[in-house]
Amino acid sequence: MTPPRAMRLHLEDVYKSYGPKLVLENIDLAVREGELCSLVGPSGCGKSTLFRIVLGQEVTSAGRVLVDGQPVGPPAPDRGIVYQKYSLFPHLTVLDNVLLGKRLSCGWFEARRRRREFRDEAMAYLERMRLAGHAEKYPHELSGGMQQRVAIAQALIMKPRVLMMDEPFGALDPDTREDMQVFLLELWDQHRMTVFLVTHDMHEAVFVGTRVLVLSQHYTDDRGQAAPRGSRIVGDYPLPNAIYSTKVKTSPEFLDTVEEIRRVGFDPEHLRHVTEFNLRHADSFQTLTAEEHAGRVARVPS
């Protein structure tokens, strides 16, 4: 296993419970700088909980979470975030929305002294988002896709180590959503930023991600039926980088990958043993207990 300090994001043996309910169990994940990770899983499997743990909004019940080798702290600018609902202030212009984080990160006098510097930087981001001509408009004057691009600029201007995206395109119509998927890939290709994207759309996950993580409660181990179980990463798939053409979504290889992910993570009739998870990515690792695979030798056909 690559040392945690060499990874942008490192989770090891992470558990999360709410009272007697075990939600996440033995989460092991290592993410290098510049990866675009899609996270999928059945409803109620704990995707949002894992997202909040990485963001720092939730504290683990056990295990460790590191960003650049350091324990994760409360929410901070090193983890930018884009939600499904646009995090824009309706009374501020597009430009002022993008500038807000910079202004709030320093004192009044410094913000005033650096206002031209901050404005030029914000306009540069809006140029990249193809929104420079809309800088003085208000959010209600923009389409949904344009508002989401403003929200992405709002996060990126703070130069986060990890860009967290929680169903960022879920509220958009299908055509706009696909345009935003391509736009995100173009942006990622320009900056090679580390992205952690939660989505319920597996086609989106496979198209956008350079890596797809499958979180699921559907698996088996050797602890017996009475043992409480939380969700684990049951699949970790490396994917080709930066595919911009949406035509790939109709290719047999693409559709086969989507169906395999659906079967591995979403089908309660298709239960894999913890020692048989589809952890294909080179950085995948597991910290299993002896009880979880105690009978594994006996289960292997001679």
Image (cartoon, rainbow, N blue to C red):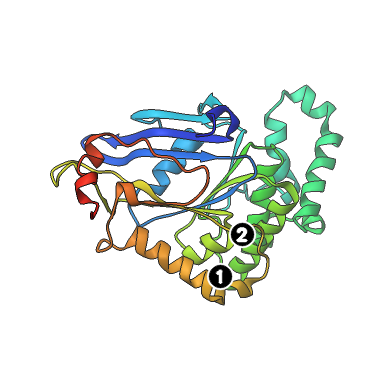
Residue 230, x across and y down, in percent: 28, 43
Quadrant hosting residue 99: top right
Q: Which residue type carries mark 2?
A: Pro
Residue at left offset 66%, top offset 48%: 91
Residue 39, x across and y down, in percent: 47, 52
- Height in image: 207 above or below 125? below
Quadrant hosting residue 77: top right
Q: Is residue 129 visible?
A: yes
- Height in image: 244 above or below 53? below
Is residue 20 toward the left or the right of residue 150 in the image? left
Closer to the camera in the image, 223 or 262: 223
- Local crowd size for mark 1, using a 10 Å CA cut-off: few (<14), some (14–19), many (≥20): few
State the SS at label 2: loop
- Height in image: 141 above or below 294? below
Closer to the camera in the image, 170 or 142: 170
Residue to which mark 2 is pinned? 240
Q: Which residue type carries mark 1?
A: Asp
Is residue 201 toward the left or the right of residue 193 in the image? left
Q: Is residue 135 visible?
A: no
- Height in image: 227 above or below 83? above
Quadrant hosting residue 302: bottom left
Q: Residue furthest front?
A: 302
Residue 106, x across and y down, in percent: 71, 25
Residue to which mark 1 is pinned? 173
State the SS at label 1: loop
Is residue 29 toward the left or the right of residue 268 in the image? right
Which of the two marks, 1 or 2, is nearer to us in this view? 2
Residue at left offset 68%, top offset 43%: 156
